[in-house]
Amino acid sequence: MNLSIVIPLKDEAESLPELCSWIERVANEQQLSYEIILMDDGSTDDSWKVIQQLRTANAHIKGIRFQRNYGKSAALNEGFKAAQGTVVITMDADLQDSPDEIPDLYKMIVTDGFDLVSGWKKKRYDNTLTKNIPSKFFNAATRRMSGIKLHDFNCGLKAYNNKVIKSIEVYGEMHRYIPVLAKWAGFRKIGEKVVEHRKRKYGITKFGWERFVNGFLDLATISFVGKFGKRPMHFFGLWGTLCFLLGFGISIYLTVSKLIDSSNAITNRPAFYVALTVMVIGSQLFLAGFIGELISRSSPERNVYLIEEKAGL
């Protein structure tokens, strides 16, 4: 199969028929064998009923319905597991991503040999104050942390070599950082393409201001996990050892000064409490490293979701 298109959605019943029809037309024009995997992330409208109707009319359409809302990362992760195409493309279900971009994205993976191509919505129709400006800060921070020169990490329109999506695990809210996850997994050929951003036609956005706060928290998480996820002792052990040695050094100094001049009461000096505090912190960091090592070796349920129903899978 040439192409898998994974579409996470929540309460997008109105847009699904038009979106699937548009994708079908583009795929047929390009003579691509394809599948459309619609990930219903706990919709409360008629989205699943629409998916079943679309599946009846077009066998290329498949669906997975979560029992409750888990978030976009969970939907993408399960969609990636089900995808069979040589190239996997993700897009949002709200018609703000144009299926007309599919042929060029597909060629960049197959012909140009990119591992991952991220869309760049150079001209956006979102609110400048609540979305565009925070997005610029978010992307600048992610570029600096990851070393990946992309303008729009959070763009839902992306294309992947199948090997990439089978090599990474998307959980929590890490969908914003899939290019970073791919880089940490060893995929270095990451490209970018300017894509069309369309005005929302149906419904309202499902993301609020809190996504930017969560985004920067996730950035700190993925930065740590990418560097020390498999070896947390290298981080906690290093700082724990340095703190302990600093406190121990101060203690030695206070002890020697007491031996030289017995009138110097150790417990009456502020340095004694500084040394004690630093040594305790150092010991706690060191123990955190050991606990982190144990946890990193066994986390079997961090990506387990309740799936209520499937269609075509």
Image (spheres, rainbow, N blue to C red):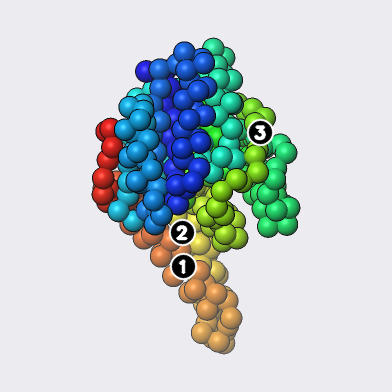
Task: State the residue position of label 2.
Answer: 240
- Residue 232: tell me if it is visible: no
Question: Residue, x 32% and y 40% (percent of image)?
Answer: 52
User: Where is mark 3, residue-wise?
Assistant: 196
| Mark with earlier residue (3, 1) | 3
Residue 47 can be seen in this image:
yes
Percent x, y of residue 70:
38, 53
Q: CA distance from mark 2 to mark 3?
A: 49 Å
Q: Are marks 1 and 2 in contact (CB under 8 Å)?
A: yes
Q: Is residue 98 left or right of residue 235?
A: right
Q: Are marks 3 and 1 in contact (CB under 8 Å)?
A: no
Query: Which residue, given by chain and number where applicable, does mark 1 sit on?
Result: 281
Q: Secondary structure at mark 2?
A: helix
- Packing grade of label 2 (10 A; few <14, some 14-19, many >=20) is many
Q: Disc 2 marks which amino acid? A: Gly
Number of numbered markers: 3
Instruction: Identify the residue shown where x is 34% and y is 56%.
Output: 68
**Measured Cα–Cα span from mark 3 to mark 1:** 51 Å
**Image: 36 above or below 68:** above
Give the amino acid type for the residue marked by disc 3 in the picture: Glu
Q: Earlier in the sequence, mark 1 or mark 2?
A: 2
Q: Position of residue 233 (x, y in %)?
A: 40, 50
> Between marks 1 and 2, how big is the CA–CA gap?
7 Å
